[in-house]
Image (cartoon, rainbow, N blue to C red):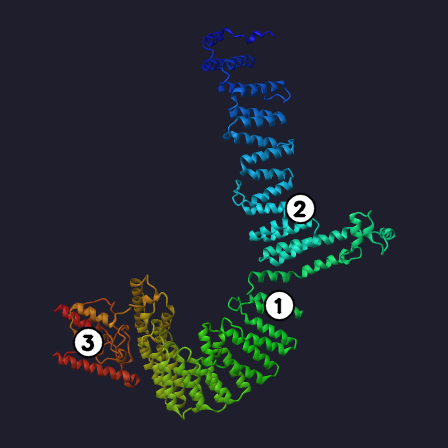
Amino acid sequence: MAISKELYPSEDDLLYEEELLRNPFSLKLWWRYLVAKREAPFKKRFVIYERALKALPGSYKLWHAYLIERLRIVKNLPITHPEYETLNNTFERALVTMHKMPRIWIMYLETLTSQKFITKTRRTFDRALCALPVTQHDRIWEIYLRFVEQEGIPIETSLRVYRRYLKYDPSHIEDFIEFLVKSKLWQEAAERLASVLNDDQFYSIKGKTKHRLWLELCDLLTTHATEISGLNVDAIIRGGIRKFTDEVGRLWTSLADYYIRRELFEKARDIFEEGMMTVVTVRDFSVIFDSYSQFEEIMVSAKMAKPDLSVEEEEDDEEHGLAEDEDIRLDVNLSMAEFVKKVLNGFWLHDVKDVDLRLARLEHLMNRRPELANSVLLRQNPHNVEQWHRRVKIFEGNPTKQILTYTEAVRTVDPMKAVGKPHTLWVAFAKLYETYKDIANARVIFDKAVQVNYKTVDHLASIWCEWAEMELRHKNFKGALELMRRATAEPSVEVRRRVAADGNEPVQMKLHKSLRLWTFYVDLEESLGNLESTRAVYERIIDLRIATPQIIINYALLLEEHKYFEDAFRVYERGVKIFKYPHVKDIWVTYLSKFVKRYGKTKLERARELFENAVETAPADAVKPLYLQYAKLEEDYGLAKRAMKVYDQATKAVPNHEKLGMYEIYIARAAEIFGVPKTREIYEQAIESGLPDKDVKAMCLKYAELEKSLGEIDRARGIYVFASQFADPRSDTEFWNRWHEFEVNHGNEDTFREMLRIKRSVSASYSQTHFILPEYLMQKDQRLSIDDAKDKLKQAGVHEDEMAALERQLAPAANNGNAKDSSRKVGFVSAGVESQTDGGIKTTANHEDIELPDESDSEEEEKVEIAQKDVPSAVYGGLARKREGSEEDGDNSADANGKDGESRLGALARLKRLKQA
């Protein structure tokens, strides 16, 4: 065949041709030649490739480039084109020398796969696996498996290839199983999956857990039950149920589904029942029950949808049927179906018209749901008392079932592990017999119940009480009392010794100290016994040291009802010795009220001793009612003076938050008994007794109202002045409004201006000193205390005697009895220092006053001329006498120190004079 002129070398190619003539085995020269001719037609390049490969048949670079260009040419051609055959021949020629190159094999195999040559491709894959080393096989197998998974590849071919591949790499068994499932080869898929699960060393490359593989196997076995044989499906699924407890419900339904698909319906029902009786979670039970009920509904609907056998067919069967006395086993012409039909004809379980039976099954299943659900909860915890009670309630109306349930419950529940109160099972069991008038069996149940070792004594005591109540309901009073005596009997020494040797003390050994049992017993004795037996029970309770304050009170009331008053009071005495506060409070109140009611004034001294004893032992927060009761006694049967003394003691004994209320009661009673003037001393005592500032202010307002009602306007104004230090004008507007109203009604222009000045002064003191402090701190440092005044005078160099005079000037009406309250605010204007003999006005010391020269003071004294009238000393009572005594003591001390007979100066004036000197 002549070669076309186009394929001959051109003048431009002569340079490359000359070099190749000189060195035809140089890969570099051939490659430079091909690069230079890259724009030339392929046919010309084809000639160059062929010449080069003929000179260098072992060059991978040349073969690879040649095959790539060949593949590029056939890329858009149909697979039936002759070029594909040429390409295949080229690959075959290349593999003569390139059979160790996996890339060449891969290109060839992919090309053959696209050409759909099954046999040739398979054989080529085999050649490649034989030619390449094992380390390169994974690259070939990847393409090989893609090839056999294509449509049109025979299943047997694919299976053989996969089996060969698993011998090379067994870890890809999951891919094979997926292929089998996809190919609907259920038998081998199930066998392979079962072998995987039996292999303890298997590791899933796809990250599947054993649990997931188990579920896949169960789904496979149940879904294709009729197509898989040779595997013990029942054993496999039961093994999964034992191993994987979180999917128990699903596995049970899968096993039942397996038998349903094999049309073994009775076996499926047995599986459903077994599953419901073994699961321990409500979720699994719900899954099984829903599947079971759905299965029964489908069975009923399928039976109802199936047309009945016509009457003609039945008659035809009867005509062609065998005689009753003829043995059908001798008829060899019968088929198996006909044989079964003839044999089972007439049996009720094989009745064709069994719709009613199936409906009854479904209804029975639905009715059993509460019982089955309760069984699941009891399997979770068989010691749950509440669930046992609910189970009994399910069988309401069926006493036989209820008795069986109670019997199982008391046999199963361990009192030490019980959740709830196990004794209630015994009580309910006995009450069930009692409901049906079987008292003898109820007593047997109670007798067994009291022998059980419970966790607490209270449970055992409850059973004894219920037993006694049952006897009372049936009018067996002697039997109830005998039961209580038996229950409260103390164990003998021999029994105690035996139990101590045993080491495990039952609750029966502590029953005789059960308070619940004794209270029930004493109620029975009060109702059914006599006084002596009841007293013996009460005494026994007190001797066992289990009495409560209520029992003491009940005992005393019992004795009082039977006119044993002194015995009742002795019981009260024992009670107050046994108990402490706060438990003894009710005993004291009852004791004192009963004693006063009984004896009145006949045994007044004894009553006083009782009250004194009561208030001495009572804490501060519980002493108020006792003092009120004590004062009421003195008012009714004693002396009014002693009543006032009791009230005075009460005001000091009660806690601070109750003092105000106690003082109000004290003042009210004093005003009623001794008149209003007597209350002044109480008001002053209350104000100086250490009340909280808020209560002091309230007391001052009441005191001022009292003085105003008596017409003592100046005294009322002085009280308002004193109380102003506790009232911040910004927050306490009520106080200042009342003072404002008082000055409008009873004052003049000067007193009103003085009120406004004091208001500004107090407001300034609050705003400048305490503007960021809370109210209780704002009221804390309003005025100098006595100790603060002493400290400041010491720093100024004033001697001690002068400081004593200053103290008397700052607190002229200080009560000697309250000297221990050193932090008391000074400045209160007492009733005994309103008037002065020197004609000047006595004012309250104010440490915030501006210090002015002496001349201004003297000028003021000259300008102010106010006529004063002394108030009768009878109004002030003992305070005026105290004031006169203190002034005399001050004069004597001044004479003793060698002072001149000049008038006594105030502390501020003496301090100024000392500075000037």
Q: Is residue 276 left or right of residue 779?
A: right
Which amino acid, mark 3?
Ala
* Residue assigned mark 3: 805
**What is the x, y in percent for residue 180?**
62, 38
Residue 628 lies in quadrant: bottom left
* Residue assigned mark 1: 405
Mark sitting on residue 225: 2
Residue 911 lies in quadrant: bottom left
Q: Between marks 2 and 1, how big is the CA–CA gap?
A: 40 Å
Q: Foreground mark, 2 or 3?
A: 2
Residue 588 lies in quadrant: bottom left
Residue at point 39%, 91% (across, down)? 604
Which amino acid, mark 2?
Ala
Q: Is residue 521 left or right of residue 651?
A: right
Q: Is residue 95 above or below residue 140?
A: above
Q: Foreground mark, 2 or 1?
A: 2
Q: Residues within 10 Å of mark 2 (few under 14, many from 20)?
A: some
Residue nearest the viewer, comparing 216 with 627: 216
Q: How many marks?
A: 3
**What is the x, y in percent for residue 31?**
47, 15
Farthest residue in the bottom direction? 602
Residue at disc 2, secondary structure: helix
Q: Is residue 492 above or below residue 785?
A: below
Residue nearest the viewer, comparing 47 with 768: 47
